[in-house]
Amino acid sequence: MSANTRDSFTSKFGVIAAAAGSAVGLGNIWKFPYEAGQNGGGAFLVIYFFFIITIGLPIMISEFVIGRKTNANAVRAFKKMSPRTPWYFTGVMGVAASFMILSFYGVVAGWTLEYIYMSVTNAFKGQSPEDLSNVFNAFLANPVRPVMWQVLFMILTGIVVIGGIKNGIEKLTKILMPVLLLIIVVMGIRSITLGANVNEAGEVIGHSFDGLKFLFKPDFSKVDINVVLDALGQAFFSLSLGMGTIITYGSYVRKNNNLNKTAVEVAFLDTLIAVLAGVAIFPAVFYFGVAPSEGPGLVFTILPGIFQKMVGGYIWTLAFFTLLAVAALTSSISLLEVAVAYFVEELKMKRVKATIITGSIITVLGVACSLSNNVLKEFTIFGRNIFNSMEFVSSNVLLPLGGMLIAIFVGWFVKRSDFYAELSNENTFKLKFFNAFYAIIKFVAPVAIAIVFLYSVGLLK
Ligand code: TRP
């Protein structure tokens, strides 16, 4: 297949927009705050930063390079770079991970659609934090409604993916990012300035500043191996790494794009938005006197509460949940694209057919995830329901494992000079930190991931 027959991003901004669109999503605004909340706040944040810089960024650069060099989907990319070896299995694992991730991702994205609907009908008005928590739990307990929204969301994802790279993905993100950033900053300011919450009896229920302390003052006494594993998984999840999304997107990037810069910019923006989401949420969590460790429902109960306290709350709520749904969409299309690119190019399927088949399988898996919050609640695997199992196995196992394989592949099986040439656009510019980068990819990243794994399964103590 010649490179010309494949779609590509039209501009430099298009690449950043699409990759950032993939990275920024529910991972930043839904998953990061609840993971940080469950894992003690500040210490989790520090470990998370550490993994983003030392592991996430180098692996993102590696994925970009593999994708652009081979101009192929996640599986073919490995076959091209290392013919007649089992390395392509890394790509196969990635395709499997994309099915798993998108199954629960579509469910949570469906929740955002319900929240758009509730924003439109002004359903949050006058609700106390307990009311809001009850609203969320009642919604989750309903077997039908979340599924309905999830299916709708998956259909939307399928439509954009059928539209192809240029038309679908690029446009959507260009408008989204700046506006989303703005709203989160405004929310953060409101959240911090909530101050002390005193009830009628004069008792202090909570103070917003405690939320900032929680997020930024690390307490390492709370850290155990599970916190470290969650931070590692979250770094991979949030940056869309370890399963070929960035390989696939890299394959649509033009040869004159500076992949280093793109990766740094994407990682920076992604981390910024996660931290800002934390700044918006935790002060309000403490102000309302809610437990930060509440879990996946955290943002859905807290955020409408912040908007209640804002002038023009109706508009803010509506704008926020709409943008959150769009951010989820630009991420979900990147997940589906991995599977579709594979089905189209390896199994020689038409794009429409590939999208319908993969989308349908994922939707069915997603229905099981959704039902595990109500009728299938009792059904557990190693103590986790279906939803949590999908989330745990994909982000905490498959992604770091995929990342480790990618690092080993690049560090030990790709010729250093080949890699350098691709990353420097055939030596059109100098790579200042290449030695450090190479040492990380070759030694630090694989060893660090292996150690976290061995600890978390108890083989290392
Ligand atoms: N990074 C996205 C988010 O934060 C989710 C996502 C998109 C993803 N593509 C991925 C996660 C690939 C892991 C792998 O919402």
Image: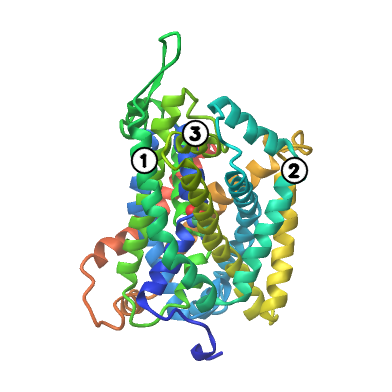
Gap in Å between the C-alphas at discs 3 and 2? 27 Å
Mark 1 Cα-neighbour bin, 10 Å: few <14, some 14–19, many ≥20: many
Q: Tell me: 38 left or right of 60.
A: right
Q: Find numbered disc 2 in the image and state the secondary structure of the residue it sits on.
A: helix
Cβ–Cβ below 8 Å for labels 2 and 1?
Answer: no
- Quadrant in the rendering for residue 415: bottom left
Image position of 223 (left or right of 382) = left
Q: Where 124 sits versus 146, above or below?
A: above
Camera-near label (1 vs 3) is 3
Q: Amino acid at mark 1?
A: Gly
Mark 2 belongs to which amino acid? Leu
Do residues under tags 3 and 2 come within 8 Å of each other at their CB atoms? no
- Percent x, y of residue 47: 36, 41
Q: Is residue 48 visible?
A: no
Residue 238 visible in image:
yes
Is 265 rendered above or below residue 252? above
Looking at the rendered image, the quarter that the N terminus falls into is bottom right
Q: Earlier in the sequence, mark 2 or mark 1?
A: 1
- Earlier-in-chain disc, 3 versus 2: 3
Q: Position of residue 445 (x, y in %)?
A: 39, 54
Q: Which residue is mark 3?
A: 305
Q: Which mark is residue 371?
A: 2
The answer to whether mark 2 is within 8 Å of ligand 1 is: no
Mark carried by residue 188: 1
The x and y percentages for residue 162 are 63, 75
Q: How is the model colour-coded?
A: rainbow
Q: CA distance from mark 2 to mark 1?
A: 33 Å
